[in-house]
Image (tube, helix red, strand yellow):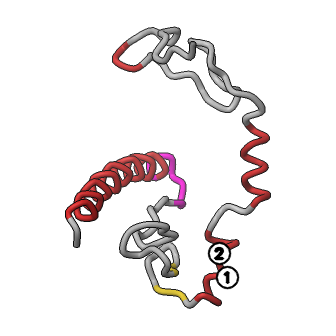
Amino acid sequence: MPLRNAMNEVLRDGYTEDCQRGVDKWNKELTNRGLPASLTLPSRRFNRAIGIYAGHHFDAKGNPLTASEWEKQKRDLLPTDEDMAYVRSLMPSAVTEPGKMANWISPPLRGINHQPIEFEYVRLD
């Protein structure tokens, strides 16, 4: 495996571990609230466009699929055009003013590194 690909795999491992920590926290919250649902991350093989799994088809658990099986299942496995349109409808316009939140986001208790909510983290000019 070329060095660059190996480095990308190591970085992908770190990213996956970080995502898993977030999923674990959400699952703990679901359990604490008595909800039977739980969240899982998809397999690293799922829906890959780059890397060693690119060009191959796998379900979310990492099981191999034939091209025809993939075509039959992908509407259930990936967001549809309708799903994406719905998400876009939730965000009719960008909110870029410091201290303001989109209507679908709850404001945090405090800003990053204990900065005030109104702190200008990014300048767009």
Q: Are marks 1 and 2 in contact (CB under 8 Å)?
A: yes
Q: Nearer the viewer, residue 64 or 23?
A: 64
Tag on residue 36? none
- Percent across and percent down for residue 23 are 42, 52
Relative to 120, 82 lies left or right: right
Please say if 69 is above or below 25: below
Residue 93 horizontal/vertical position (percent): 74, 28
| Residue 37: % across, % down | 54, 60
Seen in the image, is 80 located left or right of residue 61? right
Residue at (52%, 70%) from the top-left corner? 47
Q: Which residue has dot 2 on it?
A: 74
Residue extent of the magenta highlight: 31-37
**Tag 1 secondary structure:** helix
Q: Pointer 1: what residue?
A: 71
Residue at (60% x, 27% y) in the render: 106
Q: Amino acid at mark 1?
A: Glu
Gap between marks 1 and 2, in whole Å?
Answer: 6 Å
Front one among 55 and 19: 55
| SS class, disc 2 | helix
User: 10 Å neighbourhood of mark 1: few (<14), some, or many (≥20)?
Assistant: few
Q: Amino acid at mark 2?
A: Lys
37 or 113, which is in the foreground? 113
Q: Is residue 18 above or below residue 79?
A: above
Residue 70 point in image, percent of width and height: 61, 82
Q: Residue at x 63, y 66 (%)?
A: 78
Instruction: State yes or no: residue 125 in magenta.
Output: no
Foreground: 121 or 43?
121
Magenta stretch, overall SS: loop
